Image (tube, rainbow, N blue to C red):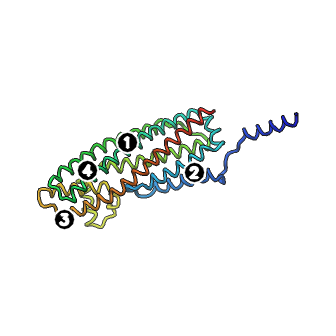
Amino acid sequence: MKREMETCSSNSFSHRSISLPTKTNPILHRVEECLAVAKGWQAQPHSLTSNGLAHLKDLFFCTGNFLQMAYSQQALRRKEKFVNQLMDDFLRLLDVCGMVKDSVQQMREQQEALQSMFRRRDQNLHVGISRYQSTRKRMRKEMIKCQQMMKTMEVLAFPSDDCKVEAILRDVKTNTVYVFELLASIISARNPSWSVFSRLLSSKRQNSPDEENINEIERLDAALFAACGQLNKELAEDSVQSAQRLMENLDRCLRGVEDELEGVFRCLINARVTLLNILTCS
């Protein structure tokens, strides 16, 4: 009996004293790899692609495995205030993700209707362009709201300490906020269409690299601005073809972004549920 009690006591002690995972731990190593890829992507020039969202989805998938580790769960049970704050932040990010997804869907629907009008050479093309531009204005307002919500998350962050699990989750949240801030900025394209149009003309005349800094949405905005100036005359065929090419390219980008946003949305829900389970099972 005494020997059994000693064995039981020894097992209990070894279960409680789980050591900090090293970089050789495959799950931790994969999370750090995904964070490195995400940070590397942040340093590159950006356009409206789903790459950042794809990296984010990979990161959350690995983070889900990281949160299932016994060490991670034990560390987070001692960080109730931090976990509650993180769950609140993830809830705000879910709201932001939903708002961005709705805006992308609305823009894609309006653009498809406009594409159809261009193909038919519809006489009411100016109405379709005005409708699309109205949608863009509403989207800008929504994206400003998203950016304000994300600024609130930065203000409410708690000071960090030496906890490895907390540091990794802070990095995950910071990367998520960055991707959504960038996406909101690209979608809002707050520069006036005439300004973008002037930059495009200037860059083509001078072979300027500035053209690379104009994203797909801005290009279409500028093309529609130029088309508006020709509506009273015969709309030039090259203007029609240029606008159609831009809309086809943008449609592909928007579909990719919409699909990846759906995946990120599910990842955020799963991460929040896992955090809630960690607290309630403590």
- Amino acid type assigned to the residue bearing label 2 in the image: Val
Q: Along the polypeptide, which appears first: circle 2 or circle 4?
A: 2
Q: Along the polypeptide, which appears first: circle 4 or circle 3?
A: 4
Question: Quick check: 74 left or right of 134?
Answer: right
| Mark pair 2, 3: CA separation | 51 Å
Is residue 44 or residue 110 the one in the foreground?
110
Question: Quick check: 95 left or right of 14?
Answer: left
Q: Secondary structure at mark 1?
A: helix
Percent position of residue 12, x then y: 76, 37
Q: Along the polypeptide, which appears first: circle 4 or circle 1?
A: 1
| Residue 8 badge | none
How packed mark 2 is, by other alpha carbons closer than 10 Å (few <14, some 14-19, many 20 or more), is many
Q: Secondary structure at mark 4?
A: loop
The label nearer to you, 2 versus 4, is 2
How packed mark 1 is, by other alpha carbons closer than 10 Å (few <14, some 14-19, many 20 or more), is some
Question: Label 2 belongs to which residue?
Answer: 31
Is residue 209 or residue 225 the one in the foreground?
225
The label nearer to you, 2 versus 1, is 1
Question: Label 1 belongs to which residue?
Answer: 99
Question: Label 3 belongs to which residue?
Answer: 237
The label nearer to you, 2 versus 3, is 3
Q: How many marks?
A: 4
Q: Secondary structure at mark 2?
A: helix
